[in-house]
Every structure is written in C-alpha cells, then in structure tokens.
Amino acid sequence: MTNSDLDALQITDAGIYPMLLASLSSSPTAALLGAAVGLVLGLTGAGGGIFAVPALVFGLGWGVPQAGPVALLAVGASAAVGSAQGLRAGLVRYRAALLMAGIGVCVAPLGTWVAHQLPEHWLVGLFAFAMLIVATRMYRASQGKGGVAGSVVVPPCRLDPATGRLHWTRRVASTLGAIGAVSGFASGLLGVGGGFVIVPALRRFSDITVHGIVATSLFVIALISAGTVANAWWHGMHPGTQGWLFVVGAVAGMVIGRMLAPRLAAARLQQLFSVLMALVAAGMFFKAFGG
C-alpha cells in the first residue's frame, strides 16, 4: 500500500477497519504520536492538544493546513472522552459551555478561511507564538504566579451561593460569548481545541472551581471541534488511514492520561510540558523562518 493509496482512502464501512488493522501493524507511528498527544491532554486537563499539529507536522511530514482539521478531530474526540467524567460528576457548566461552543462553532469557519489565505510559514509562526504563550502561562501557573499577590478581584461571572450555579446577567453572557468567539477562531485558524484560551479566561473572569473549569473546557473543546471538523468534512476533508490511526491513538492516550493524572504531581507535570512546548515552538519557528 502506497502513501497515495492511504491519502485517497475514503471512509467506508467495508474498508476502514481492515485498513486500520493492517496499517497499525506496518506503520504505528501515527497511532503512537496520537497516543502521546492524548496522554498530554489527559494529564494536563486542557491545552495539551496544542501538541497535535506539531506531531503531525514533524512526525508525519504534513503541512499545517492539512494537519489542522485532523488534529482538531483527534483533540475533539479525546476531549469528548475526557469530559464524560466531568458530566457524570456534575462539574460541567453546561449552559456556559453551550453558549461558548455555539458562538465558537459560528466563528471557527472564519479562522479556517484565514488559515487558507495565509502563507504556510506565517501560519507555522503564529502557531509557534501561540505555543510560547501557552508554555509561559502553564509554567507560571505551576509556580503559583497566575495572579497578583494581595489583590482581590471580583470576576464578572460568579456562582450563586444559594444554588451553586452561575448567576446569569447580560455581562456574564457577553463575557462567555467573547471567550467562545476567540476560542472558535483559534480552533479554525490553528487546528487546536481552544483550551489554551478557555481555561485561563475562565480562571480570570469566573469563580468556578479549577476542576469545573477543566471539565467545562473539555466539553466546549469537544463541541467546537465537532462543528469545525464537520465544516472541514463538508468541504472535502478526509483523514485517511494515518489520520484515523492518529485519532484512535489520541483517544487511547486520553484514557490513560486521565487514569494517571490523580497519581502524579500536577505542578511538575505542568513544568515539564511547558518546557517541552517551548522547545517544540522553537523548532516550529526554525521550520518557518530558518531556511
């Protein structure tokens, strides 16, 4: 089976499962890369999916426009699995999630359109810049430097002490809508789930617990990814065998990561992944502008 045969594979009930099994035994790279991405996403809660595009670019030699939709499919499927636990535990703020996701899905096609207008080296550079921002925030959060010492800031999105639910106002709706719009644009532009936007934004503008923020973020990522991938599919995107192996690996990695996360030191994990993310970002900058 040649690479062109794999790329031309159409999703059919008769052909995909035998193809997946045959390809997994002969070329496990895509599945292993997907598992690594899912593991990072599962361990860090959100934001780890930003590794998906670099994994496809460096690991499989894909271009960023080709890698983006497949990466988003993998991140979305993994986030759906990860958010199921939060839904069962009642941690997901589903009304806020539906609002953010609904607006994000509407804005995401604009990001996808911009991605196809930009030269690839600029797109790679933008992605690397986003990775550096995420790495910096993750490292600072691991050291407890996320806020200003001694200051008391009242967030616009607050929980009602009597009900434990968000107290909805026009300001709350507009704040969450803006978060969803930025997240959706980033999803379409860079092929990421948007967790690197949602998590810090909710931590800054709400008093939702950290566990609730992570669970809600994963739910929003799953919904926005589904809408963005559906739009890409409508315009002719087909992952091919390697793409599907990457998705399956990512879901498996997410399951393993969520099992391991409670047993590992969160701060050390964040520091490790932030350093790794900065190194990958440097490699992408070199790929974009170094030669």
Image (tube, rainbow, N blue to C red):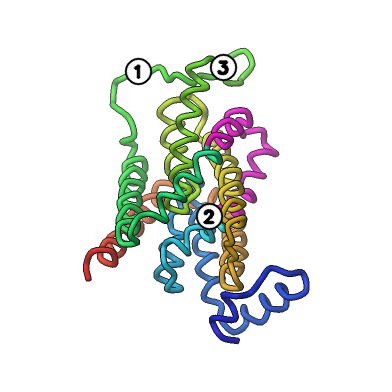
Q: Between marks 2 and 1, how big is the CA–CA gap?
A: 37 Å
Question: Do the residues under discs 3 and 1 have CB atoms within 8 angstroms?
Answer: no
Say what amino acid the circle numbered 2 marks.
Answer: Leu
Side of 246 where 288 appears, left or right: left
Q: Which mark is residue 59?
A: none
Say what amino acid the circle numbered 3 marks.
Answer: Trp
Q: Quickly name the residue at label 1.
A: 152
Q: Between marks 2 and 3, how big is the CA–CA gap?
A: 31 Å
Q: Quickly name the residue at label 3.
A: 168
Corner quadrant of residue 146: top left
Give coordinates of residue 164: x percent, y percent.
61, 20
Residue 85 sits inside the magenta stretch: yes
Question: Do the residues under discs 2 and 1 have CB atoms within 8 angstroms?
Answer: no
Q: Which mark is residue 72?
A: 2
Q: Which numbered disc, 2 or 1, marks the residue that appears first in the sequence?
A: 2
Side of 130 where 75 appears, left or right: right
Q: Which numbered disc, 2 or 3, marks the residue that appears first in the sequence?
A: 2
- What stretch of residues is rendered in magenta? 75-103
Give coordinates of residue 255: x percent, y percent.
62, 56
Give coordinates of residue 64: x percent, y percent.
41, 62
Q: Is residue 15 above or below residue 102?
A: below
Residue 76 sits inside the magenta stretch: yes
